[in-house]
Amino acid sequence: MSKETWSFIIVAGGTGSRLGGTPKQFRLLAGIPVWKWSAMVAEKLWEEGAVEELIIVVPEDRIAETGEGCRLRIPTRLTAGGAKRSESVMNGLKISCGSHVLVHDAARPFITPELCRRLMEDALAHGASVPLVPCTDSLKRISSGKMICVDRTEYFRTQTPQVFEKAPLIKAITLYGTDGTDEAEAWIASGREISRTEGLESNFKITTQSDWERALSMTGASKIQRTGHGYDIHRLVKGRKLILAGIEIEDPELGLLGHSDADIVMHTVMDAMLGAAGLPDIGTLFPASDAKWKDADSRELLRTVVAKVRSRGWRIDWVDVTLEAQSPRLGHMVPDFIRSVASYISEENGETNFNMKVKSGEGCGAVGRNECMICHGVAVLSRYNWDQA
C-alpha cells in the first residue's frame, strides 16, 4: 500500500427531507453531528498512516458551520455539494489528492476502521470494493401487478464507504453515473471489476425516524417523555366562519371570533405540543397585536409549530383534545376532524397519533348558553437524551 495515497470523502450534501427537521447529517447524535462520527473514523485511519486527507462535501450554506465544527487533526477540506449525488461526489473527487478514494455517506455513522481497512485491501487487489450485506428477509418482486418470488441469496444490500482507484472512478461517473444511486453502479456500468467485501449490519443508513431512534439507542441515549396541556376559548358571534380542526362547517348560525381564523381545536393542539416541548405558547409566537396574523390559516400555523417542535428532536407520540360545544351538533364529524389534524402531526410510521371528543354544554354555563366554545388538550412528546458527562 506504500505507493498508493488515499483520500477519505464524506458526502453530506443531501437535504435529509424524509426524516424532517434538521438534515440528518447535521443532527446531533450523542452531542456530535452525524457527519462527524465518520470523520472521526477517518482521523483514526490518518493516525495509523492509512489515509492522507479528509474531504467533506456539504450544502454550500453549511460550509462555514461545518468548518467551525471540524476541530480534527487530519488535514481536512470542504467543498459544496451539487443537485445530485453524483455531482456532490465529483466535487469531492476534484479536490482530493489521493490516487484512491473512500466515498462514504455521512448518514452512516457507525463505520469502523477495520471495515475501511478491509475495503482498502480488496480495492488494491481489484481496483474497487464495496461492502455488501446479505438479505435475510424473503423477497418478492412485483411485475405487471403480479407478485413473483425471488431467491434472496442472489441479492445483497450495498453500504458505504465504497473504495475505488480515483481516475477510473471519475471517468465512470462522467460516462455512466449521473443518475446512479451509488458509485458502484457507474463503476460496474463501465465494465470494470469490483470486489465484494463483507459489510456490517450496524453500518445502516439513517433515513427514517425508526433509523434515527435505532442510532440513538446504539449511543446509549435514553428516551424521555413530556406531557403538555393546551387550552383555548373563543366567543361565538354572528357573521364569522366556523372552522374546527381545519374544516369549515357549512352554514353555521354563529362562528368563532378571533384575530386569526379562530380554529379553537388547532390552537389547542399547538399549545399542548408547545407546552410539552417547553416552548412559548401561540399567543407569543403569533401575537394578535401583529397584523401579519390577521385571519391567519391555523393549518399553516400548525405546520410551523410541528416543524419547530421536531427541529428540537421531539417526536409527537399522542395528542388528545376535548371540544365543549352546545351547537351545532358535531359528533358525526369527529372522524373527519381526527383525519384532518392527524394529517399535519402524524409521524413517518403513518399511525394516527390524534384523538378528539366533542362534549355538549348540557345547557350549563357560557358553553351551554352558546356564548362560546372551549377546548382542552394534552400532548405527549418524546425524544432521546444522553449523558454527556
Image: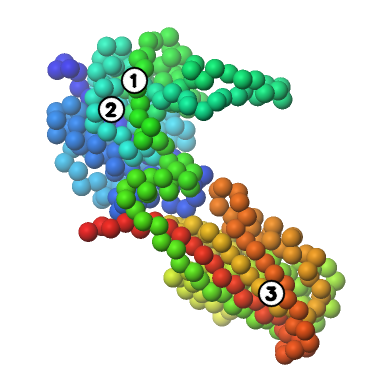
Q: Which residue is mark 3?
A: 323
Q: Is residue 328 visible?
A: yes
- Give the residue type that dot 2 points to: Leu
Horizontal side of residue 96 vs 343, given as left or right: left
Residue at 81 percent across and 75 percent down: it is 328
- Give the residue type that dot 1 points to: Thr
Helix, strand or loop under label 3:
strand
Mark 3–mark 2 Cα distance, whole angstroms, equals 57 Å
- Give the residue type that dot 3 points to: Leu
Mark 2–mark 1 Cα distance, whole angstroms, equals 9 Å
Q: Which residue is mark 1?
A: 197
Q: Are marks 3 and 2 in contact (CB under 8 Å)?
A: no
User: Where residue 96 sits in the image (x, y, percent)?
Assistant: 27, 28
Q: Are marks 2 and 1 in contact (CB under 8 Å)?
A: yes
Helix, strand or loop under label 1:
strand
User: Where residue 282 sits in the image (x, y, percent)?
Assistant: 54, 73
Horizontal side of residue 40 vs 380, given as left or right: left
Residue at 18 percent across and 29 percent down: it is 52
* Image quadrant in which the N terminus is located: top left
Mark 1–mark 3 Cα distance, whole angstroms, equals 59 Å
User: Where residue 134 sits in the image (x, y, percent)?
Assistant: 44, 23
Horizontal side of residue 157 vs 271, given as left or right: left
Helix, strand or loop under label 2:
helix
Badge 1 local density, few (<14 within 10 Å), some, or many (20+)?
many
Q: Is residue 296 visible?
A: no
Residue 228 versus residue 177 in the image, above or below: below
Q: Which residue is mark 2?
A: 115
